Amino acid sequence: MTDFSLIETLRFEPESGFVRLRLHLARLTRSARRLGFAGAGAAEGHLKEAVRGAEGPLRVRLTLDRHGDIAVTTAPFSPLSDEIVWRVRIAATRLDSSDRLLRVKTTRREVFESARSEFSATEADEVILLNERGEVCEGTITSVFLDDGSGILKTPPIACGLLAGVLRTELVCQRRARVSRLSLADLESGRLYLGNSLRGLIRAKLVV
């Protein structure tokens, strides 16, 4: 299947530039090479051109299709308050751990849209998906992190059927997080966080 594009969603700050730019570009390049998509090398130039003259924080979305065509869109970005706690629910929709496309970020998002549609915005700020074995995978737009009191966050392994999130990669490389299979019981017994490169870590509470 090649009827999709690769996506990278970045945060841009006028004073410091793109947040985690190198990790985003590395993931895009790795994914493009794996899928046989051309043009990843031109991504950085397109990104920098898109934010030229920007005076405020931006959410920047880049897509790369199989022909090597790149599109970049921007929108104003407002960070969440440090005090906010997201309400999180568990989707009935399941991920298939054998689907290797779940390991790359693409426009093929039907399963995530289905999970998100199970709850209204007033019922949940984010929805977590499990795989066919009932293992915790990821949110519809976030990676999952659990503080079990050990001092190092736990985050599900890619083998469960999930995206190698950029924030997740950074935290694992910094040894602030380690890979560990998680169950629903684990989420209920620890301190839950969700996160992505755009918004960082977000405190979350599981609603059952």
Image (cartoon, helix red, strand yellow):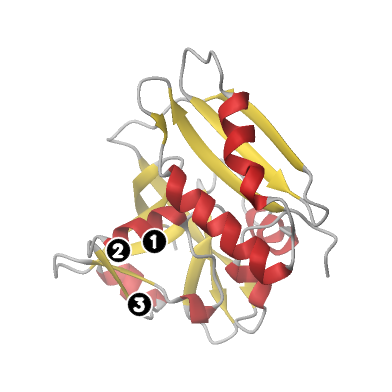
Residue 192 located left or right of residue 102: left
User: Nearer the viewer's eye, disc 1 or disc 3?
Assistant: 1
Above/below status of 106 relative to 129 = above
Amino acid on which disc 2 is placed: Cys
Classed neighbour count for the residue bearing mark 3: other residues with Cα under 10 Å, few (<14), some (14–19), many (≥20)? few
Above/below status of 96 relative to 77 = below
Residue at x 55% of width, y 52% of height: 141
Secondary structure of the residue carrying numbered label 1: helix
Q: Position of residue 78 (x, y in %)?
A: 45, 25
Residue at x 54% of width, y 31% of height: 59
Along the line of sight, the residue nearer the viewer: 134 or 47: 47
Q: Please identify the quarter of the rendering in which residue 178 is found.
A: bottom left
What is the number of the mark on residue 93? Answer: none
Above/below status of 92 relative to 60 = below
Q: Which residue is mark 3?
A: 185
Q: Position of residue 97 (x, y in %)?
A: 60, 81
Secondary structure of the residue carrying numbered label 2: helix
Sequence order check, earlier mark of 1 and 3: 1
Q: CA distance from mark 1 to mark 2?
A: 6 Å
Amino acid on which disc 1 is placed: Thr
Residue at x 56% of width, y 43% of height: 9
Q: Contact (CB < 8 A) between labels 1 and 2?
A: yes
Question: Which part of the image, by quadrant, shows the N terminus?
Answer: bottom right
What is the number of the mark on residue 173? Answer: 2
Residue at x 51% of width, y 80% of height: 160
Sequence order check, earlier mark of 2 and 3: 2
User: Nearer the viewer's eye, disc 2 or disc 3?
Assistant: 2
Q: Which residue is mark 1?
A: 169
